[in-house]
Image (tube, grey):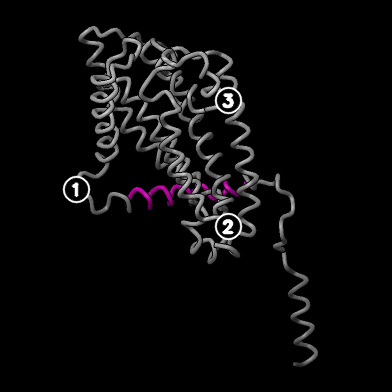
């Protein structure tokens, strides 16, 4: 190679404006970069929605079929056979709302926990903020929740017309706060699991089994008022209990959740979400070597 060519290459190197270096600070969550890639989040949402229902007959109606079937089963087993109290709330309203909120929380948790393993092929080929993937999952799950919530409003109007013992509160307009609460909790915990499952794949089997048990430790098929005092500590340790019970209080005027349980759940949600972001930030640096 001629001397002048070498000098030209050296001059080009000196003109570089962007240099990529390994990021050492785990607290650098690159949130500004995520905001710049907001169009990519929209594309992920559109892709997932289209792929999920492209060749289906009922399409988005599947969003409400699952909670409706669960509501019918819970009504028959826990309402008619076991005779569990619902604090005077009609069975369909009680079980449907609990199933709706739990499904949203569970999907946020599971989708974010599969971020690395499900997207390894894409992550290994092109760079973009990895956090855009779990964020897009929150939005796609939110679409399903919105469809389910519209059906719940139909049920509420029906029982209101027939003068069922439900008392609608204006606090119910704060419903989006409960959704954000559950989304941050489920996503934060899922991000922690996602960072761990890159090395330990069998943890996914444990998570599936654990989520089934977790549901019955959450007031989905029974109200908190039916829980004995000796077991109340379990629901203080379960951050998903407070938002679900609070939803029923706001929309139906029945339920019981203490301020201490609400504060405890909010603190745990903030801690899990912050820890999840840090674990995810750390895991994305090395996951491609072990996935």
The residue nearer to you, when weighing 15 against 162, is 162
Task: Mark 2: give few (<14), some (14-19) or many (20+) Cα within 10 Å.
Answer: some
Write down the quadrant of residue 288 in the picture: bottom right
The residue nearer to you, when weighing 121 against 75, is 75
With 194 as the anchor, is 89 left or right in this view? Answer: left
Q: Quadrant of the C terminus?
A: bottom right
Q: Earlier in the sequence, mark 2 or mark 3?
A: 2
- The answer to whether residue 113 is visible is yes
Q: Secondary structure at mark 1?
A: loop
With 192 as the anchor, is 164 left or right in this view? Answer: left
Q: What residue is pinned by disc 3?
A: 266
Q: What residue is pinned by disc 1?
A: 57
Tell me where residue 211 appears, x and y as whole percent.
Answer: 44, 38
Q: Report the magenta residues as a range.
A: 32-50
Q: Secondary structure at mark 2?
A: loop
With 148 as the anchor, is 17 left or right in this view? Answer: right
Q: Earlier in the sequence, mark 1 or mark 3?
A: 1
């Amino acid at each position: 190679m001629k001397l002048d060519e070498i000098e030209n290459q050296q001059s080009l190197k000196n003109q570089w404006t962007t240099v990529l270096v390994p990021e050492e600070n785990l607290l650098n969550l690159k949130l500004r970069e995520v905001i710049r890639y907001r169009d990519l989040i929209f594309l992920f949402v559109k892709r997932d929605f289209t792929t999920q229902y492209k060749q289906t007959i009922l399409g988005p109606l599947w969003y409400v079929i699952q909670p409706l079937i669960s509501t019918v089963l819970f009504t028959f087993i826990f309402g008619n056979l076991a005779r569990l109290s619902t604090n005077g709330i009609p069975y369909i309203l009680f079980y449907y709302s609990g199933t709706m909120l739990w499904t949203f929380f569970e999907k946020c948790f599971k989708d974010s926990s599969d971020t690395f393993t499900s997207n390894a092929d894409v992550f290994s080929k092109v760079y973009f903020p990895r956090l855009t993937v779990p964020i897009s999952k929150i939005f796609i799950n939110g679409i399903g929740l919105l469809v389910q919530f519209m059906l719940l409003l139909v049920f509420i109007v029906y029982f209101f017309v027939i003068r069922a013992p439900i008392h609608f509160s204006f606090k119910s307009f704060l419903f989006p706060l409960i959704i954000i609460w559950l989304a941050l909790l489920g996503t934060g915990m899922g991000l922690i699991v996602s960072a761990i499952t890159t090395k330990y794949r069998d943890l996914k089997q444990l998570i599936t089994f654990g989520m089934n048990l977790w549901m019955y430790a959450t007031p989905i098929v029974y109200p908190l008022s039916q829980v004995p005092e000796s077991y109340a500590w379990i629901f203080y340790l379960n951050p998903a209990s407070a938002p679900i019970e609070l939803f029923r209080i706001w929309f139906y005027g029945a339920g019981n959740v203490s301020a201490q349980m609400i504060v405890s759940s909010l603190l745990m949600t903030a801690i899990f979400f912050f820890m999840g972001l840090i674990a995810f930030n750390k895991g994305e640096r090395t996951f491609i070597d072990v996935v």
